[in-house]
């Protein structure tokens, strides 16, 4: 039930219930009516409209989303775009008048393909339920605020249907993003996790994720993904007041953060390094399920290494894989002082006591 609706499920006439099937989501097998911005994107990508025309996408979408009383009125309004270029871009028009005329014809074609006055149908009438950007679509149920009697949401997670959105710079070649390493924390198993995760972020997040600029849009880490934090998900219910009240009762207790002791004297595994590894690395590198078979929580296992061989080479910090990885962007990076202490320990022969 949508917790914001005030709807009482006990009032439902069960004889009127319908079972979900393929068509519930896959409702536009054909005859899809794209939103104007998508139609323009496609037309420009195919070369049907020259992208060199200044502001053509903006002007076309503005004309296409306007409500007209008749097709004739719509065609005239779209045709008037040519006058705007004659007046506002006279130099460009004098040299490129033909491509502007061709663009206007294509915009009129798009209108005829998505608006039908006699039937009183347009691109908003029968939305495609596969998606959630132009209509509720998936978020009709997966909006975070449809809860069962145990206050568990119909799960709202990107990777139920597709990969986590990735934003790459123009010179990047990036097709995937590493979501996490190690076992899934118990908190993440809560069906309401997406709606509550920003309220429970703590130091342990960096055990699995890169966390620079958390909640930001700089795309410098997993937690600063602009595809997530830079979008307004109109049809999701993240901030529904009734949901927020329910979430309060499900928040896990605050994290108990282990402290790394102040180093006095030279570091050894038992007086400093082992504790550092336990605090910073154990979430992924502990026990039989350790990532890459690398257990850093005991002296023997740390020195033995893992799938990639030994990661600590006593007397040679520069050639030790552990140091090399920690000098790059890594989950649970050591601070500069901590890394200096690890380097000093390795250069000193990596003593246990």
Image (tube, rainbow, N blue to C red):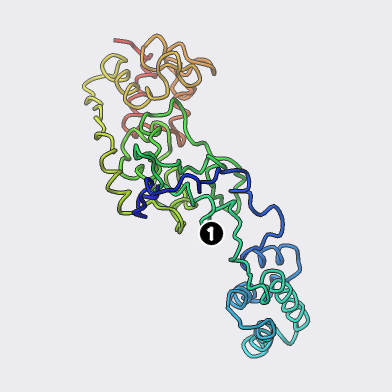
Q: Nearer the viewer, residue 313 or 191?
A: 191
Q: Residue at x 49, y 16 (%)?
A: 293
Question: Visible in this render: residue 193?
Answer: no
- For the C terminus, the image quarter is top left
Q: Position of residue 80 (x, y in %)?
A: 66, 87
Left or right for 255, reference 156: left
Q: Position of residue 328 (x, y in %)?
A: 46, 35
Res 177 → quadrant? top right
Classify mark 1: helix, strand or loop. Answer: loop
Q: Nearer the viewer, residue 217 or 244?
A: 244
Res 111 → quadrant? bottom right
Q: Tag 1: Cα neighbours inside 10 Å, few (<14), some, or many (≥20)? A: some
Q: Position of residue 305 (x, y in %)?
A: 47, 14
Query: According to the image, label 1 marks what residue?
Result: 135
Question: Visible in this render: residue 160?
Answer: yes
Counting the numbered discs, the total is: 1
Q: Nearer the viewer, residue 66 or 4?
A: 4
Q: In this picture, is 26 found above or below 68?
A: above
Q: Residue at x 35, y 49 (%)?
A: 8
Left or right for 78, reference 260: right
Res 176 → quadrant? top right
Q: Position of residue 168 (x, y in %)?
A: 56, 50
Q: Residue at x 43, y 30 (%)?
A: 326
Q: Nearer the viewer, residue 237 or 281?
A: 237
């Amino acid at each position: 039930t949508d917790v914001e609706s005030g709807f009482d499920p006990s009032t439902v006439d069960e004889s009127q219930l319908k079972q979900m099937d393929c068509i519930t989501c896959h409702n536009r097998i054909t005859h899809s009516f794209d939103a104007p911005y998508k139609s323009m994107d496609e037309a420009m990508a195919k070369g049907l409209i020259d992208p060199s025309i200044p502001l053509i996408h903006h002007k076309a979408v503005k004309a296409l989303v306007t409500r007209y009383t008749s097709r004739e009125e719509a065609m005239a309004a779209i045709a008037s775009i040519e006058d705007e270029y004659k007046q506002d871009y006279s130099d460009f028009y004098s040299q490129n008048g033909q491509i502007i005329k061709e663009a206007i014809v294509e915009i009129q074609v798009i209108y005829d393909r998505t608006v039908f006055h006699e039937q009183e149908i347009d691109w908003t009438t029968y939305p495609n339920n596969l998606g959630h950007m132009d209509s509720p679509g998936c978020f009709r149920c997966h909006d975070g605020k449809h809860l069962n009697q145990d206050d568990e949401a119909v799960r709202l997670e990107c990777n139920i249907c597709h990969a986590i959105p990735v934003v790459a710079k123009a010179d990047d070649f990036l097709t995937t993003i590493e979501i996490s390493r190690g076992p899934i924390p118990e908190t993440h198993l809560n069906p309401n996790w997406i709606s509550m995760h920003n309220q429970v972020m703590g130091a342990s997040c960096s055990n699995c994720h890169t966390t620079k600029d958390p909640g930001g849009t700089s795309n410098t880490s997993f937690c600063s993904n602009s595809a997530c934090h830079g979008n307004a998900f109109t049809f999701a219910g993240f901030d529904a007041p009734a949901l927020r009240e329910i979430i309060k009762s499900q928040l896990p207790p605050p994290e108990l953060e282990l402290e790394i002791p102040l180093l006095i004297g030279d570091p050894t595994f038992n007086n400093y390094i082992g504790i550092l590894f336990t605090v910073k690395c154990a979430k992924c590198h502990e026990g039989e399920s350790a990532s890459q078979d690398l257990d850093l929580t005991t002296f023997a296992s740390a020195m033995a290494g893992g799938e990639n061989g030994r990661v600590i080479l006593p007397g040679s910090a520069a050639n030790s894989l552990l140091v090399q990885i920690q000098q790059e962007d890594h989950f649970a990076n050591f601070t500069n002082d901590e890394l200096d202490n690890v380097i000093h320990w390795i250069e000193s022969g990596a003593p246990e006591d």
